[in-house]
Image (spheres, rainbow, N blue to C red):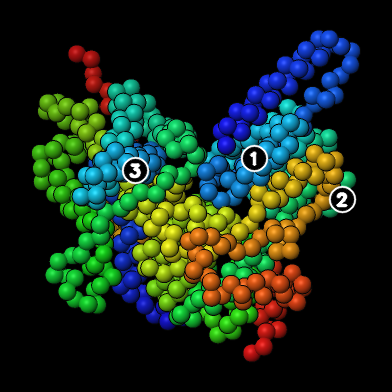
Amino acid sequence: MRGMRGVGVLALAMVVVLAITACQQRAQQPAQQAKKFKVGIVYDVGGRGDLSFNDMAFAGLEQAQREFGDRIETRDLEPTAGGENREELLRLLAGENYDLIFGIGFLFTDSISRVAKEFPNVKFGLIDGFVPDLTDASNIVCLLFNEHEGSFLVGAAAALKSRTGVIGFVGGMKIPLIEKFEAGYIAGARYVKPSIRVLSDYAGTTGEAFRDPVKGKELALAQYDRRADIIYHASGGTGIGVFEAAVVKKRLAIGVDADQSLTVKDDQRPQILTSMMKRVDVSVFETIKAFVDGQYKGGYKNFGLAEGGVGYAENDYNKDMIADIKDRLEDLKQKIVAGEIKVPASKAELDTFLKSLPK
Amino acid sequence: MEYVTSLLSLALIASAIRVTMPILLAALGAVYSERGGVINIGLEGIMIMGTFFGAVGDYVFARQYPALVAAIPDLAPAAGVLAAMLAGMAFALIHALVTITFRVDQIISGVALNLLAVGLARFLNILFFGVATQSPGVSGFTPVDIPILEGIPVLGPIATGISPMILVALLLVLIGHWTLLRTRFGLRLRGVGEHPRAADTLGINVYGMRYAGVLISGALAGMAGAYLAIEQAHLYFEGMTQGRGFIALAAMIFGNWWPLGALGASALFGYFDALSLRVVVLPVPSQFINVLPHIVSILVLAGFVRRAQPPAADGVPYTKEEE
């Protein structure tokens, strides 16, 4: 990785040198060939090294850097701990003539709408946020995920694997975005096993709820005490506490966003049944690719099961655990992609969905 | 639903004890500081340092001395706790220096510490671990069983598999109460908090005693942070203190500036916190429980619950008259 970056830097240096010499030789002509697209990313609170959301965005940026290294230059910035300066950072990048800027996380919604108005020539990518009334010509593209579809699959996995007939969900901040995970999870569980009981808890109602592993652990312990044997978390850093509780109680947990089996501590690894993957890296990469190819369009882009934007994780550690249910999950996946199962994306839709299930 | 009936279930009490501990340790620290006459609202910041250095001490020790840790696994978390207490004292020393020696307003210094800690922890985390917001996982203490009680099956949740730090914390409360009430050090510390001029006249080193109070509070708040990182979450995570330092201040006020009072108040707050996590149907919204510690401390300070009796010279910088 470092080597690649070194090569990139070297290439960049050479291009700059060439550009300068070119300019010196023919000062009148603009150096068209040397013009690189500038791509910037501003992370969500949590920043690089969160082993999930932000790291996946960075992975997408890195992939783009590898593939279009000669045509783009990239920069990534981290907001302060509370994220208060996220708008300043966007404006900083826009002011430095960046061509394409990503805001990672729904908290950027308002900031990006404002900054995008001030810099009509700059294009923006907004992960997870929804800005209303966008068109193809807008300079914002909202990159949205069908988390409910992925959650449906891990919910089905949990219900199929549960021995006690009780499973749990721990959410971070109680907002519609996280309730989408919950709705899909419950729907999936009840779809494959109507008798299943699902316990739901949220860590809080502010952004702090995504970084409270202590509370996550207590919530999960409480659910395990109430006979849940598998808990799905959609709570960022709070979920680390859920995994801790799974280790203490020797039960199972389900990760979120990234394939968390790969990144957690060794003793937590056997407790992770699977993870609901949300391919932020794919969305970032695809958007950069479209931009480089001159195909950038504003508006909304959905990444669902069909697009490979969400899914469940399979790796060397959980392969055996999910071997017996894999066929069933793949079958459900096909049904969702084909539109046979319409997965609810909110609590209201969930109620309708549950009523439609055969008793 | 079955859970509503079990307000006193042992699993709930075990949970309450766990969430009480960090508040209790920090509140105990605050008692020492304020009994000596120095308000320490920098507790939250000191706790943040404690969470970070607790994880660092644990992690580094386990990496440096793998053979030793393999033989005695508890050494790594012990090193973490020690590092957290030292870091807490170092951080508290800033507060002491600024407020006691240079007589800066104690509130301002405390606020500055809280702000400094947030930035410093992130900076150091990037320096140590290359990422901004979390440390690698660390190991905790081996859980212990309480002798005698462990034999009674129904007491399982609160008598077996508990953190040794819980026992240490409870012991520290008793020692603290006895120290303040019965020892020469305690009497002198209270003396400089009540009437520094009189204490000075009697030949007590006012500055020295106040430094001692603030440093002890730093060590205890650091330990509270270490408990969060090492025993609860098994890693440092940015923002994991979640305002517990401020709740500790509330507990100290509600506990009327005494260690046993702080224990009672912390336990009450901890119990309600655990209740909000465990009881599915609460008669009040969980947000109400979150603000409860602060409402209670306002009521105490306003004299509604009972007369608050802070040390008379609490928060007042002491100026030794020039000879």
Q: Amino acid at mark 2?
A: Thr
Question: At numbered mark 1, what does the secondary structure look like: helix, strand or loop?
Answer: helix
Quadrant, the C terminus of chain A: bottom right
Q: Which residue is mark 1?
A: A62
Q: Is B61 positioned to the left or the right of A87 in the image?
A: left
A258 up-or-down from B94: above or below: below
Quadrant, the N terminus of chain A: top right
User: In x, y percent, where is residue A245?
Assistant: 40, 63
Question: At numbered mark 2, what does the secondary structure look like: helix, strand or loop?
Answer: loop
Write the residue at 53% across / 70% down.
Answer: A322
Q: Chain letter for mark 3, please.
A: B
Q: Is residue B217 visible?
A: no
User: In x, y percent, where is residue A187?
Assistant: 63, 75
Q: Which mark is residue B4?
A: none
Q: Is residue B153 visible?
A: yes
For the residues labelled 3 and 2, the Cα–Cα distance comes to: 51 Å
Q: Which-is-in-front pick, marks 1 and 2? A: 1
User: In x, y percent, where is residue B169?
Assistant: 23, 52
Q: Which mark is residue B59?
A: 3
Q: Quadrant of residue B233?
A: bottom left
Question: At numbered mark 3, what does the secondary structure look like: helix, strand or loop?
Answer: helix
Q: Earlier in the sequence, mark 1 or mark 2?
A: 1
Q: Quadrant of residue B305?
A: bottom left
Q: Quadrant of residue B33?
A: top left
Q: Which mark is residue A135?
A: 2
Q: Amino acid at mark 1?
A: Glu
In the image, farthest residue toward the top: A25
The one nearer the camera, A91 or B21, is A91
